[in-house]
Amino acid sequence: MTHFKILAGAALIALLGASFSAQAYDADWKRGRVYYRSVCTSCHTSGTVGAINPSTKTKADWGAYLLTDKHAKGKDTVSKYVSKDYRVSIKDSNKAAAKFIDTPDKELFDDIKAFLHKGAKDGDAPASCS
């Protein structure tokens, strides 16, 4: 009986530990919107491509684009523009990059993805960036 109590207690502790460590990050689409509009859109509008509104693609299109992690027709990666190194490189000229300088890359990437899904052509609130 004592062994059963010890095993049951150990199992309970293991389950509690697993539940705390398995919690996923809940992406913040509002933070993603700020970053996308301030960093991504500002760069695209100054280039020849022009602004790319979230509503120009479906959620599936955005998901596939982010999953392949290819930007500029494969010349570089999307994750490069979400990285801390990139934010540090533009922080003096971009307030959003400076504001999110210490945000983990994965969280910021997830935030942008949440914004793009929300603002997609088939999203909850199709968005344009201006």
Image (tube, helix red, strand yellow):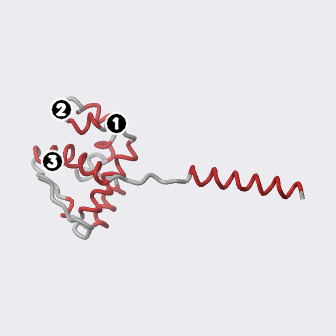
Task: Out of 47 and 76, give the one closest to the viewer.
Answer: 47
Q: Amino acid at mark 1?
A: Lys
Disc 3 secondary structure class: helix
On the image, which quarter does residue 129 sit in?
Answer: bottom left
Q: Amino acid at mark 3?
A: His
> Which residue lies under the disc numbered 1?
84
Q: CA distance from mark 1 to mark 3?
A: 19 Å
On the image, which quarter does residue 11 sit in?
Answer: bottom right
The nearer-to-camera label among 2 and 3 is 2
Please state the horizontal and vertical placement of residue 89, each as a whole percent of the image. 26, 31
Please state the horizontal and vertical placement of residue 106, each as a whole percent of the image. 40, 46
Q: CA distance from mark 2 to mark 3?
A: 15 Å
Above or below: residue 82 compared with residue 29: above
Q: Residue at x 44, y 52 (%)?
A: 25
With 22 as the anchor, is 125 left or right in this view? left
- Label 1 neighbourhood size at 10 Å, few (<14), some (14-19), many (20+)? some
Residue 44, numbered label = 3
Above or below: residue 55 compared with residue 75: below
Q: Earlier in the sequence, mark 1 or mark 2?
A: 1
Q: Earlier in the sequence, mark 1 or mark 3?
A: 3
Above or below: residue 94 compared with residue 70: above
Report the quarter where the N terminus lies. Answer: bottom right
- Label 2 neighbourhood size at 10 Å, few (<14), some (14-19), many (20+)? few
CB-based contact (under 8 Å), mark 1 and mark 2? no
Please state the horizontal and vertical placement of residue 58, each as a whole percent of the image. 26, 67
Q: Amino acid at mark 2?
A: Ser
Task: Out of 99 and 75, give the one closest to the viewer.
Answer: 99
Q: Earlier in the sequence, mark 2 or mark 3?
A: 3
> Which residue lies under the disc numbered 2?
93
Disc 2 secondary structure class: loop
Disc 1 secondary structure class: helix
